[in-house]
């Protein structure tokens, strides 16, 4: 089974044809994990997971949204995390590329959400863009023992440090890009039992559709690219990555049905 470990089907890019996309996903026999980026999209992700038995959710505040989290955001996330189809706290972390939010606020909200994840016994899904050292240090201090570095872009050496904490790594369309040497190197060299597949849709469509809207069915293209990088069959990639998803996200099962 192919599993898209990180998607944003809540994004407005899908407002015109979301149900058609859902139908395509169901026909492919896939599972998709949809990540929230603020309270609104976290609630939307939970709603999707309740409506479609092949969708799971993560709930969290993205670093771009950290300054707008609100006073009671942790309590709201805690309530959302009670739903059995919520697998993790995420997408959380740091982003120093755009600096849409003050870095100290990003760090504070990141650390608070890590504490919540630890309290709830849930893994985390981490966004780290050009903030590798600070991300690592905050994770090391947090005591969180399990999580996913989504769309991993740091070095192999840094990956070793994240693995010591208990982290996995997901790769998406970037491993099909001609000049994306660092993600390709990491995807080809990291232990296969630490790798997941993602689309990060509607962003980062793989070649040859780069620049167009991405969706979870493109996970097949990404799986094929990973198989080629590692010199193994796509069937091996499919088996390994599905097993890794289940090992990371303890609440995920291969059976559908609504919870709560």
Image (tube, rainbow, N blue to C red):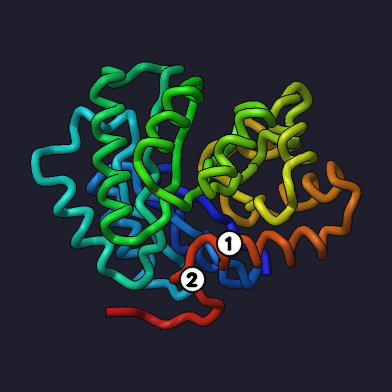
Compared with 185, 5 (above or below) is below
Residue occupied by mark 2: 252
Single out the residue that lies furthest toward the left: 71
Compared with 254, 23 (above or below) is above
Identify the mark nearer the N-term, 2 or 1.
1
Q: Position of residue 147 (x, y in %)?
A: 48, 50
Location of the C terminus by quadrant is: bottom left
Single out the residue that lies furthest toward the right: 231
Is residue 214 visible in the rendered structure shown here? no
User: Which of the two residues, 62 or 13, is positioned nearer the viewer here?
Assistant: 62
Q: Position of residue 48 (x, y in %)?
A: 36, 64
Discs 2, 1 touching: Cβ within 8 Å: yes
Q: Position of residue 75 (x, y in %)?
A: 14, 53
Q: Is disc 2 surrounded by few (<14), some (14 to 19) or many (20+) residues within 10 Å? A: some
Tell me the element at label 1. Answer: helix
Q: Is disc 1 surrounded by few (<14), some (14 to 19) or many (20+) residues within 10 Å? A: many
Residue occupied by mark 1: 245
Please name the residue shown 45% across and 75% down the image: 53
């Amino acid at each position: 089974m192919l599993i898209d470990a990180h998607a944003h089907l809540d994004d407005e890019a899908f407002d015109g044809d979301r149900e058609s996309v859902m139908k395509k996903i169901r026909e492919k026999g896939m599972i998709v994990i949809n990540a929230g980026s603020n309270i609104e999209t976290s609630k939307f992700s939970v709603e999707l997971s309740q409506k479609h038995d092949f969708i799971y959710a993560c709930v969290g505040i993205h670093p771009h949204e950290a300054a707008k989290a609100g006073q009671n955001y942790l309590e709201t996330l805690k309530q959302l995390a009670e739903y059995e189809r919520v697998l993790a706290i995420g997408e959380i972390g740091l982003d120093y590329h755009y600096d849409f939010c003050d870095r100290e606020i990003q760090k504070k909200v990141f650390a608070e959400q890590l504490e919540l994840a630890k309290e709830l016994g849930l893994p985390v899904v981490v966004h780290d863009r050009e903030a590798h050292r600070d991300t690592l240090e905050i994770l090391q201090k947090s005591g969180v023992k399990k999580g996913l570095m989504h769309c991993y872009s740091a070095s192999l050496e840094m990956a070793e440090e994240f693995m010591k904490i208990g982290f996995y790594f997901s790769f998406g369309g970037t491993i099909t890009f001609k000049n994306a040497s660092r993600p390709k190197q990491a995807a080809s060299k990291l232990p296969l039992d630490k790798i997941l597949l993602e689309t990060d849709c509607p962003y980062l469509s793989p070649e040859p559709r780069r620049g167009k809207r991405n969706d979870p069915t493109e996970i097949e293209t990404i799986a094929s690219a990973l198989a080629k990088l590692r010199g193994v069959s796509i069937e091996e990639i499919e088996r390994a990555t599905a097993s890794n998803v289940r090992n990371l996200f303890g609440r995920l099962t291969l059976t559908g049905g609504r919870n709560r």
